[in-house]
Amino acid sequence: IINYLNKNNEMIYHICYEVDDMESIEELFSNNRELCVSKPKPAILFNNRLVSFYYINNVGLIEVLQK
């Protein structure tokens, strides 16, 4: 990701949204075109809650964490 940040001069690394369920992702990104960087998978750091990453043009990297 460091190459991307250097190339695009992004100031914020990423933003995280916590959702009730991963199906909320469609609603969260309904007005934007997103690119899935990492599909939902258990995250050890968050007690195996599902986490996924998406890139939205002109916004940056978005992390989605299941409650």
Image (cartoon, rainbow, N blue to C red):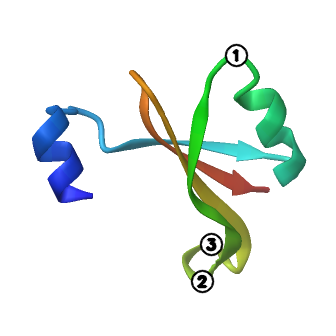
Which mark is drawn over residue 46? 3
Check disc 1 and report the residue beneath it: 31
The image shows residue 26, relative to residue 13, as above or below, that is above
Kindly state the secondary structure of the residue where label 1 is placed.
loop
Tell me the quadrant of the picture where the C terminus can be found.
bottom right
Amino acid at dot 1: Asn
Q: Quadrant of residue 48?
A: bottom right
Amino acid at dot 3: Phe
Check disc 2 and report the residue beneath it: 44
Q: In this rendering, would 23 be left or right of 58?
A: right
Q: In this rendering, would 15 be left or right of 40?
A: left
Image x and y of residue 21, in percent = 87, 52
At 40% across and 43% down in the image, what residue appears? 14
CA separation in Å, label 2 and label 1: 31 Å
At 70% across and 28% down in the image, what residue appears? 29
Q: In this rendering, would 21 be left or right of 10?
A: right
Q: Earlier in the sequence, mark 2 or mark 1?
A: 1
CA separation in Å, label 2 and label 3: 5 Å
> Camera-side residue: 11 or 37?
37
Image x and y of residue 6, in percent = 11, 45
